Amino acid sequence: MRQHVGAIDQGTTSTRFIVFDRAGLPVAEARREHRQICPAPGLVEHDAEEIWANTQTVMREALAAAGLGTADLAAIGITNQRETTLLWDRATGRPLHHALVWQDTRTAPLVAAMAQGGAGGQDRFRAATGLPLATYFSALKLVWLLDHIADARARAQSGELAFGTMDSWLLWKLTGRHATDVTNAGRTQLMNLAGRHWDPALLDAFGVPAALLGTILPSSGDFGAARDWGGVPVAGVLGDQHAALLGQGCIAPGEAKNTYGTGCFLLMHTGDRPVASGHGLLTTMGYQIGETPCYALEGSIAVAGALVQWLRDRLGLIESSAAIETLAASVPDNGDVYIVPAFAGLFAPYWRADARGVIVGLSGHSGAGHIARAALEASAHQVADVVDAMAADGAAPIAALRVDGGMAANSLLMQFQADLLGVPVTRPRVIETTALGAAIAAGIGVGLWDGPAAVAAAQEMGACFTPAMAPERRAALRARWKQAVARSLDWVAG
């Protein structure tokens, strides 16, 4: 029996392929970055052909590094940046436009118009989808493409074009099949969350032709065979944050994980039925293995690691992303400097596309170390905002927060996160749980594993950060952060 599973992890800044063994431990990986195309402020695009080329390259490189071939793979899983939207020609397989990335805010006028066009305003479709109207989600990005590409709408109605998020694009290129899974479909704002099907009423409201859409499948199962890769079955597909929930072993209600990547995403397992939020959180799919769905509450934060990249690439404050921990540790605290990184507005729990990034509290005492520390602390404060919203929604208190993603390797940040939340923060042995979750879904899909518990060794705790901050200090820091957020929200009005 084949003993390895490969996972394509197609993220916002790069694409990786990681090979996992029977224990769920990584044995080799390869990674390639792709361009961030920003034609104007608020516009973020990706070249889908570049991403596909990178995907093939990293698959070859990782297999070579592992000393394996396609004949050694039991299955391939796909996990991906969510909401990023692509339109392509079914006959040629070529995109009609760059993909519109989840961070892209060009649809703000469409969001405003849709909110005014029906009862409920920004929450007009929340009951059906679990999501507010926002530039974040795919439906209005798709509408923008249909309205701005010549003949696109007519060609879409005739069945010549296909729409998909990046999982669909890669699946199409690998297998020729036009499909997606419930987690990615749920982020388009076109899927009925409870029924897990494309909703005719939503398609009509957004003006999206049904002929554009692929088949919605569970997160684990038969997605087709990778034709140019020895016919290896693609057997698992999940959006990145849902894959991390599975990879972290959050399989019971109340268990929560937070992924620190380009953005920051906290998901809490809520059981087999959607739970509505009244405090700015998203009701979303967790994942679906077999017939029973898992739902989650989510706090989506647009900018986390992207702020560190900004300090590196735009300000030249650090030479590498990893260097921020050393710089931040060169000072004992943030020197009363706060950064609110609203580069793409603020997501949960505020949902304000008009918010703008601010740095507040600067003085003659402020130095590079204070700015670096404020950048790290911004991610932790945003996570605390989400946890506060979950508590306001009546969710059970988080006993511990499981963390993963690239920034989870930053121990300074993890300790500050534990201090702000007042609960332990646990980091697993394998912190790249996004790829692991895709591998788990694929392995289950071909019978390599019975369930997530089969890779318990990969989910073992690698480190635990225990809160050590006095409650008074925590309250003071949170109050100052909220003052900084108020400045971000007031900027446009000023």
Image (cartoon, rainbow, N blue to C red):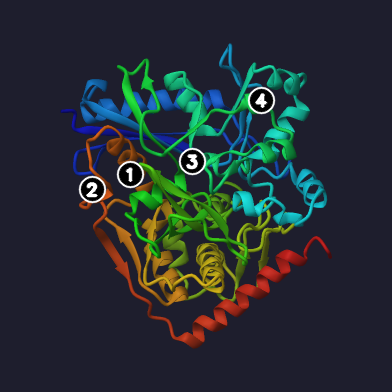
Q: Identify the amino acid type marked 3.
A: Val
Assess whether mark 2 and mark 1 are in contact (beta carbons under 8 angstroms): yes
Q: Which residue is mark 2?
A: 455
Q: Identify the amino acid type marked 1.
A: Leu
Give the residue at x 32% y 54%: 249
Q: Which residue is mark 1?
A: 436
Does the image show residue 54?
yes
In the image, residue 351 above or below residue 448: below
Q: Position of residue 306 (x, y in %)?
A: 55, 50
Chain-order first, disc 3 or disc 1: 3
Front-most of residues 455 and 481: 455
Give the residue at x 52% y 68%: 390
In the image, residue 12 above or below residue 323: above
Q: Which residue is mark 3?
A: 182
Q: Position of residue 188 (x, y in %)?
A: 60, 41
Q: Hey, which quadrant is residue 55 in on the image?
A: top left
Q: Identify the amino acid type marked 2.
A: Val
Q: Identify the amino acid type marked 4.
A: His
Chain-order first, disc 3 or disc 2: 3
Furthest-bottom residue in view? 472
Count all numbered tags in the image, as a single digit: 4
- Is disc 4 placed on a helix, strand or loop? loop
